[in-house]
Amino acid sequence: MNKLTVLLTISHSVAATERVLRGSRALKGTYEVNGECTVANFASAVGGESKLSSILGVGQGELQNTLDTRCGAAAEKKDFSDTTGKGPQFLKNFLDGGTTWNDNEETDSGEYVLSEDAAVIQTEYAAYTSKGIYSTPDGGTEAVYPGYFSNFFSGDKECTLGVIECCYTSSRKDDFVGNAEMCALDLKTARKSNHIQDSAFTIYDGNDESDIYCSGFAYDAGSFGDAAKYNTLFHMAMKTNLYDKGYVKNVPGAPLCGCIEQMPIIDNADCVDAVEGYILDDNGTVTLNITWKDCGDLKTHIKSLDKSEIEMYFIDEKIVKKGTCEAAAKSFLNDRMYVPKSD
């Protein structure tokens, strides 16, 4: 081995060692912050306010202002319509219950494998969903077709009741497990999804609860859950329900996902909740770190939020008590001046 080869070998070895050491320092100097962007939460993660002050490079009196600035900068925004890589029309159709993601089924020859067809979901989820904030889907549609993403609007306000649901009737993986019974559906609340312009409704009589699976999330106006609602939707609808479980097919006449006002009257829904968090490194860089937790029964979770009496009245009309679907359907008819058929 000549002298040049020896020098190159030593150089490569030293460089590799430095990379390992740098990686070790980065790992040791990274702190996971649970909860809101407060001095208390960040100080708890790093081991005290004095160390936090050193990491951020500011005096203790400036800690909260500095954190507010850096947490705000960490929450970079991305149009939710860009998440699929297929444009706003594809996203809208998916949310309404169409597209190849919902309709294709894997063949014996290996065509239409969900993990391949929807591979962008896993890529997007890993790259961005917990690290940035998705803004209201637009993709240029609002300027041309106002209210195009109607699934998330009640009039000109996004989901007035602060509840978003998805309901499914089938699976691409042949292991569908339902959790709710459908009671009734007012089709006019989702006209821009079902394209039925006249007043119409459906009553479900005697459906077994295995026919439908619903999940959702709720948030108070101005909360972190409100800011991150489309991140939670991606986590719930795209990653968990479609990519992981293979759940597809909307309730006919209802969107696949939308504000609770547009969804069927049901007697149960699973619940997911966004948890605010951040990553802080030794350079003082703050990165958003959203996680999600199972919050059990959606209706029970909603009751723990700061909902008004009138908001809870309308939510109670949409998610009724278990075993009361028949009574809810009759009440639905009575409200529309119909008399239920006698037994």
Image (spheres, rainbow, N blue to C red):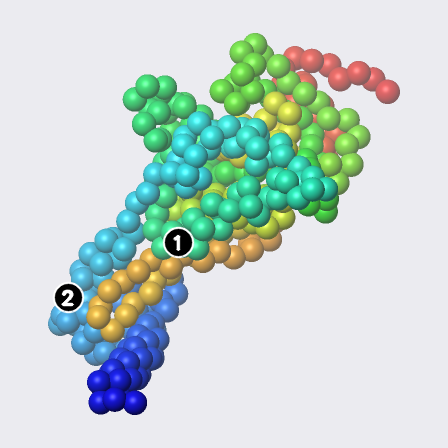
Residue at 39% in and 65% down: 34
Residue at 28% in and 81% down: 12
Image vertical order of residue 140 relative to residue 10, above or below: above
Q: Which quarter of the rendered picture does the C terminus lie within?
A: top right
* Mark 1 nearby-residue class (10 Å; few <14, some 14–19, many ≥20): few
Q: What element carries label 2?
A: helix
User: Which of 162 and 328 lies nearest the eye of the viewer?
Assistant: 162
User: Which of 249 and 67 lies nearest the eye of the viewer?
Assistant: 249
Residue at 35% in and 31% down: 138
Image vertical order of residue 172 relative to residue 334, above or below: below
Instruction: State the mark number for residue 62.
Output: 2
Answer whether residue 250 is visible to the viewer in this image. Answer: yes
**Residue 129 percent across, percent down from the top left:** 41, 51
Q: What element carries label 1?
A: helix
Disc 1 from disc 2: Cα separation: 32 Å
- Report which residue position mark 1 lands on: 127
Residue at 56% in and 10% down: 198
